[in-house]
Amino acid sequence: MSAQQAVIVGAGHAGAMAAIELRKAGWEGRVVLVGDEAHLPYERPPLSKDLLVSAGAEPQGLHAADAFAASEIDLALGRRVAVIDRAAARLVFAEGEGLAYDRLLLAPGGTARELPVPGGEHARTLRTLDDARRLQADLTPGARVVIVGAGVIGLEVASSARKLGCAVTVLEAQAGPMARSLDRAMQDYVAGLHRRNGVTLEFGVAVAAIEPRADGSLAVLLADGTAHPADVVVAGIGLRPSLELAQNAGLEVTSGIVVDPFAVTSDPAISAAGDATSFYHPGLGRHVHWQTWQHAQNHGKAAARAMAGTAEPYAPPFWFWSDQFGINIQVTGTPTEATSLVLRGDPAEDRFAAFHMIGGRVVGATLVNQGGLNRPSQQLIQSGIEVDPAALADPAVALPKLLRR
């Protein structure tokens, strides 16, 4: 690869993985990784778990501390890009200085959504290391914690808060937890897991406001007039992708920055990867917008390889994981599209697999403390073959054997 300059904007998971992968793929020119946080790139999943529970815990770096220097990657941390000047192939920082690029990779990620209600500014959010440290200071034994949102982040914070001795209530507008990813049966399982660990769950409720009280506490007011007293309120209502930079540059943007299977935007000199993208998935035949750890990692790497000249279509299976109350939950495929369910193991033992079916085809899987079944489950989903439900339910039948039938 000729000595061109590659600039990566965003030093989260997608951007940091892309930087190292770019070197591995043979990029010989200068590589600059720009991030608006001052910290070295770090893993985000522990923010809602270990970094909340363990006082003084340090973040886990995405790479060894010396990896960027060893790969001759220049870091520009604590810097915000204000403008992409596409005509000049140049970035302009908030401070006014510029940085030229030959190839640009946008990996801006996103910010935690704030509660759009009066008093919403009183709710903590969790997206960055600094967010986690502020929240940890609030999670003292006996503190009344109200969490708005029963998605992955909200439930992981609930688990951590209970471990720290807090009284926890989770409020959710949907009819069950993790409703965008789990079917009804698995929602019931997750709800039961939290209730038996002392979490109060309320579903189908709408938060109307957060009001500060004279004693320094808060009240979370519901639309029906109910008030939940709280010492800490946490908003876990999802991620708002950071699209402004791409939009202002005139790139095509829908729910995310639109890219093709090679992570290239509507400008061939600019690629994009991770949480802020809407990427065309050849296997699904449509653009999809995923916000998961695995997607950020793999999409960043795929984008880097394509930039370095070794392009392959990016068409992974959907997959994410979550740890709650010591239970590992992995979800792959599209469980919510299924019409039937096959259980392999007993949910009462907190170790089972749920296979989500359309006819005889597996279209999704929810794996509880069964991470070893993730790869064969994905293979079953991608193969599209019809399987015998009785064999699928039988733990004595190895899943790879079903692929050969």
Image: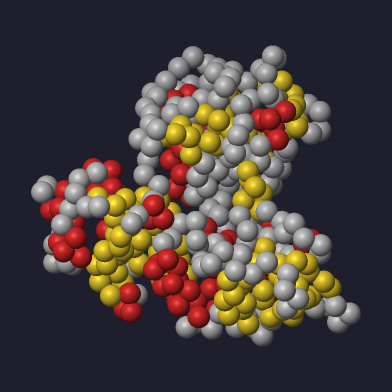
Q: State how the image is colored.
A: secondary structure
Q: Is residue 350 above or below residue 130?
A: below
Front residue of this view, candidates 382 and 153: 382
* Residue at the spot 55% in from the left edge and 25% down from the top edge: 265
Residue 211 in which image quadrant? bottom right
221 vs 266: above or below:
below
Q: Report the side of 282 relative to 9 (left or right).
A: left
Residue at (71% x, 67% y) in the render? 207
Q: Please give the count of numbered marks on the rendered protein.
A: 0
Residue in front for this viewpoint, 301 or 176: 176
* Residue at the right extreme, as displayed: 214
Asked whether the viewer can see residue 400, the reply is no
| Residue 330 drawn at (x, y percent) | 39, 60
Residue 308 left/right relative to 381: right
Residue 163 image offset from top left, x and y in percent: 55, 79
Q: Residue at x 52, y 58 (%)?
A: 45
Residue 113 visible, this angle: yes
Image coordinates of residue 181 in percent, x first then y, are 46, 57
Q: Which residue appears at 66% of the width and 41% of the height?
A: 242
Quadrant of the rendering where the N terminus is positioned: top left
Residue 133: x and y in percent read 67, 64
